[in-house]
Image (spheres, helix red, strand yellow):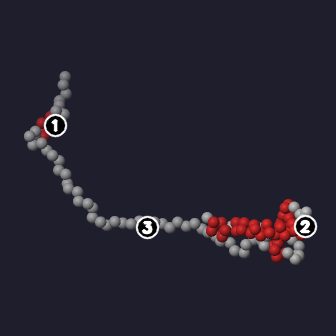
Amino acid sequence: MAVYLFGATNACQVLKLPLLVTHYIKHKQESPYITLGSFFKMHYIDAQPFDADYAQDMQLPFKTTPDTFCLNAPSVVPVVPTIDFSAPAYRPVLQPIVNEIVPLSLATAAIFQPPRV
């Protein structure tokens, strides 16, 4: 996720925050009465004059847009089904057990009987 954030978005500008802090400290040493709000107004809202520290001002985070953008398109690789051509396991055929003592005609006689009055 970090590779995506820093490569495809402007999140890489966050890595320039130490440069912002050192630039603010430099301005604070030159002018002790400068506030953080006036520093941001001077560098991000007001028109940027071409002065001695113009190159440093342009290196501050979110001052310029990156030259390159990365476009990531998610893709799904289909799973190739596997076909198993092995022979099925041997299963013996089960034969029904028939009681040879009782004839089949008598076994059904108890179920099917004529109607009674």
Q: Position of residue 51 (x, y in %)?
A: 88, 76
Q: Residue at x 70, y 66 (%)?
A: 11
User: Residue 29: x, y in percent?
Assistant: 87, 68
Q: Are marks 2 and 3 in contact (CB under 8 Å)?
A: no
Disc 3 packing (10 Å; few <14; some 14–19; many ≥20) = few
Front residue of this view, candidates 18 and 95: 18
User: Which is more foreground, mark 2 or mark 1?
Assistant: 2
Picture quadrant of residue 13:
bottom right
Residue drawn at point x = 67 percent, y = 68 percent: 6
Q: Is residue 73 above or below residue 55?
A: above
Q: Which residue is mark 1?
A: 108
**Label 2's element?**
loop
**Image point (16%, 33%), residue name:** 110
Which residue is tagged 3? 80
Callout 1 amino acid: Thr
Indicate which disc residue 31 carries.
Answer: 2
Q: Secondary structure at mark 1?
A: helix
Q: Is residue 115 above or below residue 56?
A: above
Position in image of residue 108 (x %, y %):
16, 37
Image check: 67 left or right of 45?
left
Residue at the far left in the pictured view: 101
Q: Which one is in front in this view, the residue at disc 2 or the one at disc 3? A: 2
The amino acid at mark 3 is Val
Q: Earlier in the sequence, mark 2 or mark 3?
A: 2
Quarter of the picture holding the C terminus = top left
Cα separation, mark 2 vs mark 3, equals 68 Å
Could you tell me the amino acid type at mark 2? Ser
**Is any atom of residue 93 visible in this view?**
yes
Q: Secondary structure at mark 3?
A: loop
